[in-house]
Every structure is written in structure tokens, then in C-alpha cells.
Amino acid sequence: MFKYFGILLFIIVSPSINATNLLEIYNQALRFNPTYLTSAANQAVAHDQIALVRAGLLPTLTATGSFQYFNHHGDNSQNFNNQNQNFGFGLTLNQTLIDFSKLRVLDSTKSTAIAAQLKTLAAQQDLITQVANAYFDVALAQITLKLDIQKSDDQKKLYQQAVKQYLAGQTTRTSKTDAEAAYATTAAIITQDQTNLTQKLSVLQQMSGNSAKKVAEAKAALPILRLDSLDKWLDKARQQNLEIKANQYFLQAARENISAKRAGHLPTLGVNVAFNSNKTMYQSATINNMNNVVSKDISAGATLSFPIFSGGSVVAQTREAEDSYIVTYQEGRGVLEKILNQTRQAYTTINNSVRLLKSLQTSIILQRQALADTIVSYHAGIQTMQDVLTAQDKLYAEQQKYYLQTYAYLNAILVLKQAAGVLQDHDISLINAWLN
């Protein structure tokens, strides 16, 4: 269920540069991001492996052909001439009937292919959250720069007023100096803000290939996401998270690989059928006519192999497969704990954001009023310039906290859905609709 709350925006609008929207950057990242494209390529490789392994269980048909020519002449004392021509053709069919090792390898390969597919889907979800997080970092850098520019403009006015009042003997030198120092400090901070914005844009470009100069910022109203209980979200994560499911298939593949190695002790059975046809044509000095001899034969057989001793390789390979299974199992446990922790953190952030954003809205209103009252008191000689600057710092600090919490809220929505395994492309479209 969604409910809307208002956002107080204290932003100077940047002219001339159009903002690049989040959906556009994400779509470009799908075609550019090397991590995601590598995962998709690995999925294709894993699928190809199934055909390669299955080929070892399918029949093989081999055709052969031969031709021989023989011509023997007698010497001066012998007057004869023999000629022979032989044409041969054969077909051989081989079929594995029983090979438990290859069957288990095929099962393991299929499980690995499913895991690779899930990993690709998980990589796509990672791309959504990573692109969105980088996009939000740029938006925050833009807002921070705008807030500091606005703060600098306000401090410039205070400094100019302080100079006039000092020259008129209406204020102290300290007030003028404090205003000048604050203005100079903010000017230096703006330079840092510009550098930070450039760096954040560079990170976004490296991730997506999009050379955006400006991004869209949050609208004046965002929906509040009403969540089910934390236990339900944790259950969703355990059952539906793509990384967890991928590791379950990797674990299944490791288990089947153990069976494949153990099957090295088991017998194998194969059959073969062969057909051969030969035609021999010969002519000798005593027989003028060409004679033909044609022979055809069909053979069939079965081969039953019993492995007796292989130098201990089967035992060693089985032990290695068992150790690999333990590694995969422990890695899966680590992934599970990581995902559950992400679920808890994102859930807490979303729930706390509703309270914090409302509290910060109220605080911003109060700080604005406090700043206005302090300025009036300053002109009345009751408070100092330092009091005005302190009130100003508090106002802009609250505004900065507000925007940090706003984008933390948006990011947490995506992270929570990713942890639950339900994050899809339309979710980034939804977030994009919440931006200007």
C-alpha cells in the first residue's frame, strides 16, 4: 500500500542542461556493463556444456571408405601382368548403454546451468541496485552543490550587509570578519562539491557507459511503502532470493559430482554394430576378362568393463569432490546470512525513513524560522553574526540530512526487493517515475 508525503525542496534549478533519467541509464547499462555481460556469457557457456556432456551418452556413427590399386608386371623372362582394384566401405555404430559416471556428470552439468541462469538474473538485479545507487549519489552531489551555492549566496548578502554596517559604525569588526570567513569557507566547499560531483558522474559513466552531465532528482512527493512483517520478508528472501537459489543448485551440482566420481568404480556397458562391404576387381595375363569379388559382413558386439584398480585416482577424485561440496555449502551459508542481513537493514531503513523524513521536515521549518528570528535579533543588536551563521549552518545541515534520508529510502526499496528475489525492470521504471 502506498501513501504520499510532501517533500520540502530547497534547490536552485540548473538551467540549460537536461537531466538524464534513471531508466535511460539502466537500459544502456544492460548493453554496456561488463560484469552483467560476463554473467550472461557464463550462462551461455554453462548451457553449451550440457550438449557437450550429453554427446558422450549418445550414439556415434562412423563411415569409412578405402581404395587400393595393385599392378604387377613380369620381368623379361616372364610375360604376365596382374591388376587388382579394391573398393571398401564401412559403417560403425557405437552406443553407451550404461555409464553411471557420465549420467551423474550430465545431472551435475544441468544443475550448474540452472545455477548460471539464476546468477545472470541475480546479476541483472545487482545492476539495477548499483546503477540506482550510483545515480542517487550523483543526485545527492548535485543537491549538495546547489545547497552550498545557495548558502554561499546568503552568506555573501550577510557579508555585504556587515561591511556596510561596519563602515557606518553599526556593527563590530568581528561581525564583518565572521561573515567574511564563513563566505570564504563555503566558497572552498563549493569547489570540493564540484569535484565530488565530477567523480560521482565518472562512476556512473564507468558503470553504464552513459556520459550524463546531470540526473533527475526526487519529486516533491514520494510514496510511503507499507511493509508486511519482517518475518515474512525474511521468509521471502530464504525462498526466492536468486543468489540463495543459485547456490542451492550449485550445491546440488556438487552433490551429483560426488556421485559421478564414485561411479568410477562401477562397470560400463557399450554395444557396437559394424557393416563392411568390399569389392575386388582383378585381371591377370591368363584371364583376359575382369573378375569381381564382392564381400559383405555385419558384426555386432558388446563391451562390459569392470574397473579394478586405477592407482587410487577414483578415491582421490571422490575425496576432492566431497571437499568441494563442503566449500560450496559453506559459501551458501555465507550468502544466506548476507542476504538476511541486507533484508533486515533495508526493512529497518524503509520503516525508519517515514518517521525520520517527517521529523526532518518539521525540523527544517523550525530551523528556517529560527534563522529568520536570529537575523532579526542580530539587526536589533541582541545576537551576533556568529549566532546568525550558526543558525544558517543548522538549517542547511537539516536539509542535507533530509535528502540523504530520501535517497537512502529509495535505495532501500530496491535492496529489499532484491533480497526478496522480486526486483524486476518495472521497479526501476517505478523509481524513475518518482524523479523529476
Image: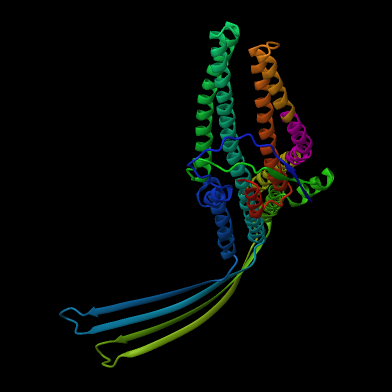
Dominant secondary structure of the magenta stretch?
helix
Determine the image quadrant of residue 67: bottom left
Q: Residue furthest bottom?
A: 289
Q: Nearer the viewer, residue 258 or 150?
A: 150
Image location (x, y in percent) of residue 417: 72, 48
Q: Nearer the viewer, residue 429 or 358?
A: 358
> In the image, which residues are magenta?
342-364
- Left or right placement of residue 83 versus residue 21 in this view: left
Please say whether residue 353 is one of the residues in the magenta stretch: yes
The structure residue drawn at horizontal position 38% and vertical position 76%, both measured from the top left corner, is: 66
Q: Nearer the viewer, residue 210 or 109?
A: 210
Image location (x, y in percent) of residue 308: 65, 55
Q: Can you see residue 275?
A: yes
Please say whether residue 388 is one of the residues in the magenta stretch: no
Determine the image quadrant of residue 299: bottom right
Classify 226 as above or below 403: below
Classify 154 as above or below 127: above
The structure residue drawn at horizontal position 50% and vertical position 49%, both measured from the top left corner, is: 32
Classify 90 as above or below 32: below
Image location (x, y in percent) of residue 84: 31, 82
Q: Can you see residue 328?
A: no
Determine the image quadrant of residue 173: top right
Image location (x, y in percent) of residue 184: 53, 17
Coloured how? rainbow
The structure residue drawn at horizontal position 58% and vertical position 24%, both measured from the top left corner, is: 154
The structure residue drawn at horizontal position 56% and vertical position 37%, both measured from the top left corner, is: 138
Q: Nearer the viewer, residue 94 or 2?
A: 2
Q: Residue furthest left?
A: 76
